[in-house]
Image (cartoon, rainbow, N blue to C red):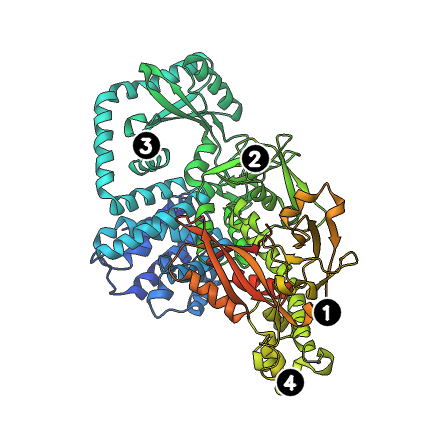
């Protein structure tokens, strides 16, 4: 444990202007407040915040951050309050301590719903000041170093949380050294057998190739020096966890991995990086498709380096990372590399970061903040957040040359929404490298992507399957919700008006505002939307408005069912011949409210189709068989009809029962049900049901779409 004067000297070593008195007060206050508290290891609790502060001095952070590290647990674990901290140590420190305290209260590995909400709060807290995350990472690192002292079940939970949340967050701001150690410590607890096996293989390889590996650094340095490039070359062995991830991701055996050994080539200037690359490629054969230029296109955590793999000395395949010393500092320390003394003050030097080609250290997290602010929720959000925290990325360009970074597997809509929400909302197609491509094309490094835009914001529902980023999916869902709301309001009002008209009543006769409280809605628009979505029965609303109509607003026995035997009563057209047989097409099941046409078939009579029935294509070249038709008032006001809908439903117990219940509650009556294309996850089902008209069918389908187990539902059209 660092003693008080050692901690102060460690800070003053890189910041001569550090407030010694503040550091001393914080050190003493932490010891006093934690008092006799003990950790699971039996050590005094105050040793923990002191060690956390010591970790952060290695990253040369400012005084406020070091003080925050010393005090980060006092509000959570002692009688100290935020006001106490503000009074003794200032508002800046109090705000930082408050941020870290909020994170400490979140259990990220909880059940899914709570996990999603807590991860939201977590991201929001650390997005306001990167120092909050830096303290929390150091806190987690020290806890992981002493994890062996806690109970096994808690050890596993903490390790999984570390691997899924904290290590990716560390990488998202470039703190490779902390992220790497967190991964190794978590791997050790989660899969000790695999880790031991990998370590044994690495030891065997070291015995086999150790001498050759030692000679590689000297040989590379010699070749570069002879070419006039001054460089230092350092060899290293990949960590067990990084090897484990490659074994999982590439689905190959240990012997097939080509880059277990890596070499870092540190040169003096950026131009020397490319000169060194040329020298190395002339000296040793390059392995195809193993070159990456992260200098011209830095990673979103500001990582810059050239990567190449060559068949080097002694025939070994070795990975080379070529970069300057400032690039190396950023590669290891990320955002912490830009804390410096400038203009008589010490802190984050944004100008130096930008001069190094860097970007906002919280840029990655702000993408997640945008998703949060747009109202995305549930389990999907957690997965999107974790996906975007990992750095499996692809780099693509706008036609004007701006760089856009996406998670690997990103598609054109992900790109469109990364550029701007307006671009995504109006996207209708894409050109990739000048060629029109499908919207489900996965983007590759270096692609130039041009979004083809339409005049209107019309986003098909199924476009959600063409995205992987939370930002894009959230924007699409928000757009669809907004668009649907207006449509459902129109549908709900029309449904209520139609229901009342059957009893000779109109909305003009009443005020809906007087009875909104009965249905617990804030506005008439909310009520109309609920009716349109099938959540509230129009008949029930009508009976509330006109109690004397109770029982008279639903379709009853007096309503005639539209069938082939009564078809002539319900459709009319100028060209209908008296006595001709009229029947409804089973391909599209027309119902009142649908736009309809008739097809005159020899020996069969007139078949009624919806205007969008797929079967009509068979008659496109013969105008003589077409008949313009309309519904009679009798059909629109006093009948029920059979409509067929086609739905794709999750293959899970009880789902079909839920569908039947929704249809019944929305006033439909199932006549027949046929399942087809049953797969492991989903199955298709055709449902014939009695409805009043097309709007009623639409209302039922809308109600079905609100069920998460229903993937798609549409009218059957042939």
Residue 296 - label: none
Give the alpha-carbon distance from disc 2 to disc 4, as whole Å. 62 Å
Residue 101 shows in this picture? no
Residue 183, position as x, y percentages in the image:
33, 43
Residue 546 - label: 4
Quarter of image, res 606: bottom right
Q: Earlier in the sequence, mark 2 or mark 4?
A: 2
For mark 3, give the secondary structure: loop
Of the two numbered discs 2 and 4 in the rendering, the one whose residue sits closer to the viewer: 4
For mark 1, give the secondary structure: helix
Residue 15, position as x, y percentages in the image:
44, 46
For mark 2, give the secondary structure: strand
For disc 1, the marked residue is 633
Give the alpha-carbon distance from disc 2 to disc 1, as whole Å. 59 Å
Residue 692 shows in this picture? yes
Give the alpha-carbon distance from disc 3 to disc 4, as whole Å. 77 Å
For disc 2, the marked residue is 396
Residue 365, position as x, y percentages in the image:
50, 49
Seen from this angle, which residue lies furthest bottom?
548
Q: Earlier in the sequence, mark 1 or mark 3?
A: 3
Image: 447 above or below 208: below
Residue 130, position as x, y percentages in the image:
48, 51
Q: Is residue 693 left or right of residue 149?
A: right
Of the two numbered discs 2 and 1 in the rendering, the one whose residue sits closer to the viewer: 1
């Amino acid at each position: 444990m660092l003693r008080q004067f050692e901690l102060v000297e460690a800070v003053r070593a890189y910041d001569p202007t550090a407030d010694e008195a503040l550091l001393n007060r914080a050190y003493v206050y932490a010891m006093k407040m934690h008092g006799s508290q003990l950790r699971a290891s039996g050590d005094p609790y105050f040793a923990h915040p002191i060690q956390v502060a010591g970790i952060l001095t290695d990253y040369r952070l400012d005084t406020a951050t070091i003080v925050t590290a010393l005090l980060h647990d006092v509000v959570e674990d002692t009688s100290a309050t935020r006001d106490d901290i503000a009074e003794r140590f200032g508002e800046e420190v109090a705000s930082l301590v408050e941020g870290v305290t909020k994170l400490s209260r979140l259990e990220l590995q909880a059940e899914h719903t709570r996990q999603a909400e807590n991860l939201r709060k977590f991201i929001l807290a650390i997005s306001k000041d990167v120092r909050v995350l830096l303290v929390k990472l150091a806190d987690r690192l020290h806890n992981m170093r002493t994890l062996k002292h806690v109970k096994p079940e808690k050890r596993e939970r903490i390790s999984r949380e570390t691997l899924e949340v904290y290590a990716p967050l560390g990488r998202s701001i470039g703190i490779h050294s902390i992220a790497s150690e967190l991964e190794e410590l978590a791997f050790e607890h989660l899969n000790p057998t695999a880790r031991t096996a990998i370590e044994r293989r690495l030891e065997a390889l070291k015995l086999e190739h150790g001498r050759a590996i030692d000679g590689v650094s000297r040989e590379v340095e010699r070749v570069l020096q002879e070419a006039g490039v001054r460089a230092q070359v350092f060899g290293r062995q990949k960590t067990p966890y990084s090897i484990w991830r490659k074994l999982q991701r590439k689905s190959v055996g240990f012997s097939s991995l080509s880059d277990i050994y890596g070499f870092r080539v540190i040169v003096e200037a950026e131009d020397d990086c490319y000169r060194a690359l040329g020298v190395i490629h002339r000296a040793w054969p390059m392995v195809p498709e193993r070159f990456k230029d992260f200098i011209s296109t830095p990673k979103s955590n500001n990582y810059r380096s050239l990567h190449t793999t060559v068949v080097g000395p002694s025939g070994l395949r070795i990975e080379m990372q070529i970069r300057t010393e400032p690039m190396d500092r950023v590669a290891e320390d990320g955002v912490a590399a830009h804390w410096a003394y400038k203009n008589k003050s010490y802190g984050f030097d944004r100008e130096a970061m930008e001069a190094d080609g860097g970007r906002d250290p919280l840029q990655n997290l702000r993408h997640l903040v945008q998703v949060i602010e747009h109202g995305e929720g549930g389990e999907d959000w957690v997965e999107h957040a974790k996906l975007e925290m990992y750095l499996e990325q692809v780099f693509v360009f706008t036609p004007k040359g701006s760089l856009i970074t996406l998670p690997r597997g990103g598609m054109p809509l992900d790109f469109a929404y990364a550029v701007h929400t307006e671009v995504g909302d109006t996207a209708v197609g894409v050109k990739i490298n000048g060629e029109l491509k499908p919207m489900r094309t996965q983007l590759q490094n270096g692609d130039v992507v041009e979004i083809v835009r339409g005049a209107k914001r019309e986003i098909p529902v199924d476009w959600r399957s063409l995205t992987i980023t939370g930002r894009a999916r959230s924007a699409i869902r928000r757009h669809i919700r907004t668009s649907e709301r207006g449509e459902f309001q129109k549908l709900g009002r029309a449904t209520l008006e139609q229901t009342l008209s059957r009893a000779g009543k109109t909305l003009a006769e009443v005020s809906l505002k007087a009875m909104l409280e009965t249905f617990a809605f804030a506005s008439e628009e909310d009520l109309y939307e609920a009716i349109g979505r099938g959540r509230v029965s129009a008949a029930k609303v009508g009976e509330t408005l006109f109690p004397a109509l109770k029982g008279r607003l639903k379709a009853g026995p007096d309503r005639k069912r539209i069938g082939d035997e009564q078809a002539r009563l319900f459709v009319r057209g100028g060209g209908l011949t008296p006595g001709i047989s009229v029947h409804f097409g089973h391909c599209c099941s027309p119902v009142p409210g649908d736009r309809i046409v008739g097809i005159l078939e020899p020996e069969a009579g007139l078949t009624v189709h919806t205007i969008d029935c797929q079967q009509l294509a068979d008659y496109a070249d013969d105008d003589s068989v077409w008949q313009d038709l309309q519904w009679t008032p009798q059909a629109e006001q006093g009948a029920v009809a059979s409509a067929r809908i086609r739905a794709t439903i999750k293959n899970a117990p009880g789902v079909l029962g839920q569908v039947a219940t929704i249809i019944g509650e929305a006033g439909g009556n199932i006549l027949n049900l046929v399942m087809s294309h049953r797969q492991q996850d989903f199955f298709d089902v055709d449902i014939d049901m009695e409805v009043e008209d097309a709007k009623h069918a639409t209302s039922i389908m809308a109600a079905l779409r609100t069920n998460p187990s229903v993937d798609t539902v549409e009218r059957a059209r042939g």
